[in-house]
Amino acid sequence: MSRPLFSLGERLFAVAEFAKGSHCIIDVGSDHARLPVWMLKNNYVQKAFASDISPFCTEKCAAFINRYGLSENIEVRCCDGLSAFSPDDADTVVIAGMGGDTISNILASAPWCADGKHTVILQCMSSFDELNSFLHGRYIILDEVPVKDSGRLYSVMKLTGGRSTSFPLTPSQNILKSHYAKDYLERLIYIEKKRLRELQNASNAHRDLEEKINNNISYYKQLLEEIV
């Protein structure tokens, strides 16, 4: 008897939709390997890698993959970021559920991701400024969508290597087609205003950072004006 398939939350489902049609994905920080298992079972991809820096997590991945009879299709690798992979291993790289600084470090250590031959799908949890600074001049956004999962708003991005002239790279105008765009932008504005208040209450001057935050707020408001 086949095991009933689980459902993905909206966040990972958006990731899966962006990766659909890939030949092979690398799911970095896969944890339980839910994403590659779901994608294989639904014929979204033909092959996948589940990787994690933690031996405990890769053991969980292997057990979960075996439970669904996919050990021949999903290979597990224990490594830091993409250190155990080469450009020919896969055509799509997924990094979801990490901070922008961590994502930037992983991509910086694997410059082949930006060769224009690979698709990179990101879902950033924090440190958006760091991620924007890293992506600028290295990647272009093909698509982006805000989603709501368990009451929290997230953005999922689909990118490839290329030199973009726009800054910040995310959020992009692609989000405006989503019915969550207004809520997502208002959430970003709230977060930036909170950061600004904290800086202004600090004893040390952070004028450069204050200017960057104010620029972010202005940009988010400009996108909002295109909705309302």
Image (cartoon, rainbow, N blue to C red):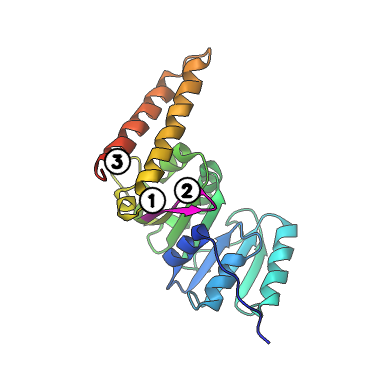
Residue type beneath disc 1:
Tyr
Quadrant of the image containing the C terminus: top left
Residue nearest the viewer, comparing 165 with 147: 147
Q: Identify the residue at image location x=30%, y=36%.
A: 221
Residue occupied by mark 1: 180
Element carrying mark 2: strand
Where residue 29 appears, x then y in whole percent? Answer: 61, 56
Q: CA distance from mark 3 to mark 1?
A: 11 Å
Badge 1 density bin: few <14, some 14–19, many ≥20, Cα 10 Å: some
Indicate yes or no whether the magenta region holds residue 94.
no
Q: Is residue 170 visible?
A: no
Seen in the image, is 199 located left or right of residue 186? right
Residue nearest the viewer, comparing 114 with 43: 43
Where residue 213 appears, x then y in whole percent? Answer: 40, 29
Q: Identify the residue at image location x=60%, y=71%.
A: 6
Q: Quadrant of residue 48?
A: bottom right
Badge 2 density bin: few <14, some 14–19, many ≥20, Cα 10 Å: some
Element carrying mark 1: loop
Q: Identify the residue at image location x=35%, y=45%.
A: 182
Q: Is residue 110 visible?
A: yes
**CB-based contact (under 8 Å), mark 3 and mark 1:** no
Seen as rendered, the residue at the extreme top is 203
Residue occupied by mark 3: 224
Where residue 109 appears, x then y in whole percent? Answer: 54, 50
Q: CA distance from mark 3 to mark 2?
A: 16 Å
In the rendered image of this protein, does residue 141 appear above or below residue 202?
A: below
Indicate yes or no whether the magenta region holds residue 150.
yes
Mark closer to the chain start, 3 or 1: 1
Residue occupied by mark 2: 153
Seen in the image, is 217 located left or right of residue 109? left
Q: Which residues are magenta?
A: 144-155
Quadrant of the image containing the N terminus: bottom right
